[in-house]
Amino acid sequence: MTLMCRFVALLPDDTPFGALVESHRETCLRCQADAARDRGVAREVHTLGTETVRAPSAMQGRVMSRLGAQDAFDPRRPLVIRLVVRHAAAVLAATATVAAVLAGLLKRRTPVA
C-alpha cells in the first residue's frame, strides 16, 4: 500500500482535498478495490436490518469471565458508578464554592459589635 493510498483511506469524502482524493481513487486500482469492498460490506449490513443473531451459549460464559468482577446483570455498572462519582464530585465542588461566596457576602453585611 502506497503512502498516498494510506492518506486517501484516512480522509472522509467531504474533505477540502476532495479533488486530489477523487483523482487518486480514479487511477488507483487498490483504492478502487477497497471502495468496492466497503460498498459490499455496507450493502450486506444494510440487508441485515434489525435482525438479531443470538451468540452461541458457550460464548456468554467466556465473555462474562473475561469481564472480571462485575455485576453479571448489568456489565455497565462500574462505568455508571464512575460517572456518578465524577458528577458528585463536581456538584460537591460547586456547592462548596457557592457556600464560600455566600459566607463572604454574609460576613460583609453582618455588622461587627
Image (tube, grey):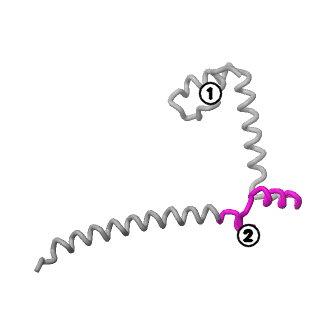
Residue in view at x 83 percent, y 60 percent: 60
Which amino acid type is shown beneath numbered disc 2?
Answer: Phe
Relative to 53, is 28 on the left or the right? left
Q: Quadrant of residue 31?
A: top right
Give how far across and how far down residue 102 sits, in percent: 26, 71
* 8 falls in the magenta region: no
Tell me the quadrant of the picture where the C terminus can be found.
Answer: bottom left
Looking at this rendering, what residue extends furthest in the bottom direction? 113
Residue located beneath label 2 in the image: 73
Question: Is tag 2's residue or tag 1's residue first in the polypeptide sequence?
Answer: 1
In this rendering, the answer to whether 105 lies above or below 7 is: below
Pick the residue in front: 13 or 79: 79
Residues shaded magenta = 55-77
Tell me the quadrant of the picture where the N terminus can be found.
Answer: top right
Give how far across and how far down residue 13 sits, in percent: 59, 34
Give how far across and how far down residue 22 sits, in percent: 61, 25
Pick the residue in front: 98 or 16: 98
Residue located beneath label 1 in the image: 8
Residue in view at x 73 percent, y 22 percent: 29
Relative to 69, is 19 on the left or the right? left
| Tag 1 secondary structure | helix
Which amino acid type is shown beneath numbered disc 1?
Answer: Val
